[in-house]
Amino acid sequence: MSAPWLVVGTVPEESAGLMEGACTLSGDTLRVGLLELPVRRGTPALLAACCAATVALGIAPPQALLAGDAGRGHGSGRAYAHLSAHLPQLAPRGLTFHYLFPDLAGHDRVFLAAQALPRRPLLVADAGFMYAAKMSGQAREYDLFTPDAGELAFLADEMAPHPFYTRGFLLAEGEQAPALARRAWDSGGAARTLLIKGETDLVVHGGEVEREIPGPRTPAMEAIGGTGDTLTGMVTALLMAGRDMTSACATAALANRLLGQLAQPTPATQVAELMAHIPAALAQAEHAP
Amino acid sequence: MRLPFGRAKKNATEASGERGVLAFEHTAEVIRAETALKAAGFAVRVMGPPPDMRTGCDMVVEFPLVHEPAARRALTAVGITPLAAAPVRAGMLEPVSLYRTTDFGAWLMVRAANMKITVEKASGRIVNISGGGCPDVPALAELMVGRTLAQCPTPAEHGQTLCSYALELAFQEARRMMPSHADTEKTA
């Protein structure tokens, strides 16, 4: 049996404690171990998309470590502590970090534990953990970040502690994205590969744009909470299936765009309504020229 | 306690016009402190702390340093105690102030910094919240989506992080743009 891939994130309920186990998706319900979770946004949306994609790809689903955290950071702290203590036994081949409180000390403990493993896992970071990874100065040790345009400006600004504070001269506009990606790489704020979400999605490796995914465009997707989570979920599944990084990113980006074309959403559509279209979107994206 | 950075505080005469920062234990306290200080008539702004103060998702309140005692009294009155006060120095960052609105016909999306809120124009109902990466974003979305601008709890009340602060800005901008749906008295 191959080593697991672990997704680490939070659910918005302080009392939920720590949950760990294999994930399955049944209709609108995500199961982690014996626990059922609604799929609305955040890490459950990432996991739901990842599960749907792994089924479509014919591979085993991911493992999850979820902490109850509604923003105070305590649950994320428990996840950091648990992870740094148990990573050697788990020996994952990949880790996807998601909605976690961006605590630098917690990040550093987990990062050092991952670096100490005999076989280095692939490291993917999105959302709050990506913020901490950038602030730690260790961004280049990560394999993949999945920022949107605003987060890209934050990665490119060596002074910024959070996307909220990105300096004004670094405008998060689409046409600036290649230059910002280069700046982020040169200043040590970027992972080796960036999958940048925008009007045109970009796959950037070592500061150089490798792929552009301009369409199809569905403007309503920007309003739907969780569409970035579905992208990170699908790219995680493709990496789990052994696709190389650039192919995984480009396929996931195209599949996420195809979700919009297939679901025909309005700005009021909820992300759970997109999940049923993942197998078709992924199949189309994998066979795209 | 005084922070281990920055210049020594000048006397009150010299310091007239000088700005200081107040640091707090939690971001939620920063949001409450800003509200309390504004209500007490102080000109304050939420800022990013200097690099040597940063721990991750944090912010400080910038205020007129000469009024520190009065500011502390205003905070004490609402049960908030700052961890520290210090003069402003180089390295402070201003928040992203960019607002952007997207008109989807029946819906309006308002973005402030990294957070977006989408509202159904006819009803004032919040239909989606997107953006951000801190763990209170999904929690706030649970509270807010499906409710109207007038009826829903505010991010300032329940948020903990910079993302929730950005969402509060987007929320207030949406209320400003749709005043007929923002009257809490009328719709409560």
Image: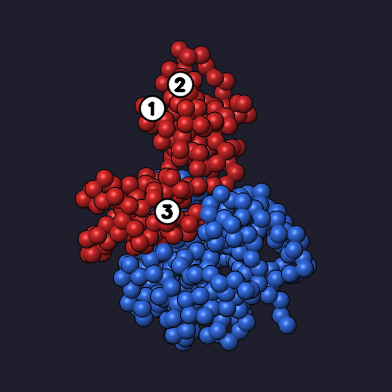
Return the residue at label 3: B114
Q: Earlier in the sequence, mark 3 or mark 2?
A: 2
Q: Which chain is red?
A: B
Q: Quadrant of residue B3?
A: top right
Which residue is found at the position 58% from the left and 41% from the top?
A: B54
Q: Horizontal placement of B156 versus A36: left or right?
A: left
Residue density around tag 1, few if under 14, some if 14–19, many if 20 or more, within 10 Å: some
What element does badge 1 sit on? loop
Return the residue at label 1: B40
Q: Which chain is blue?
A: A
Say which mark, if any, is on residue A170. none
In the rendered image, residue B27, in percent from the top left (x then y), is placed at: 52, 42
Q: Chain of mark 3?
A: B
The amino acid type, in three-letter code, at marker 3 is Asn
The amino acid type, in three-letter code, at marker 2 is Ala
Q: Chain of mark 2?
A: B
Confirm whether circles 2 and 1 share one chain.
Answer: yes
The amino acid type, in three-letter code, at marker 1 is Ala
Which residue is found at the position 51% from the left and 75% from the top?
A: A29
Residue density around tag 3, few if under 14, some if 14–19, many if 20 or more, within 10 Å: many
Measured in 3D between alpha carbons, the distance from the residue under mark 1 to the one under mark 3, in whole angstroms, is 29 Å
In the rendered image, residue B115, in percent from the top left (x then y), is placed at: 40, 54
Return the residue at label 2: B70
If the image is split into quadrants, where does the N terminus of chain A sit? Answer: bottom right
In the rendered image, residue B156, in percent from the top left (x then y), is placed at: 42, 45
**Mark in front: 3 vs 2:** 2
Tally of numbered discs: 3
Q: Is A17 placed above or below B88 here?
A: below
Measured in 3D between alpha carbons, the distance from the residue under mark 2 to the one under mark 1, in whole angstroms, is 9 Å
Q: Horizontal placement of A140 versus B121: left or right?
A: right
Which residue is found at the position 47% from the left and 65% from the top?
A: A41
Q: Quadrant of residue A227?
A: bottom left
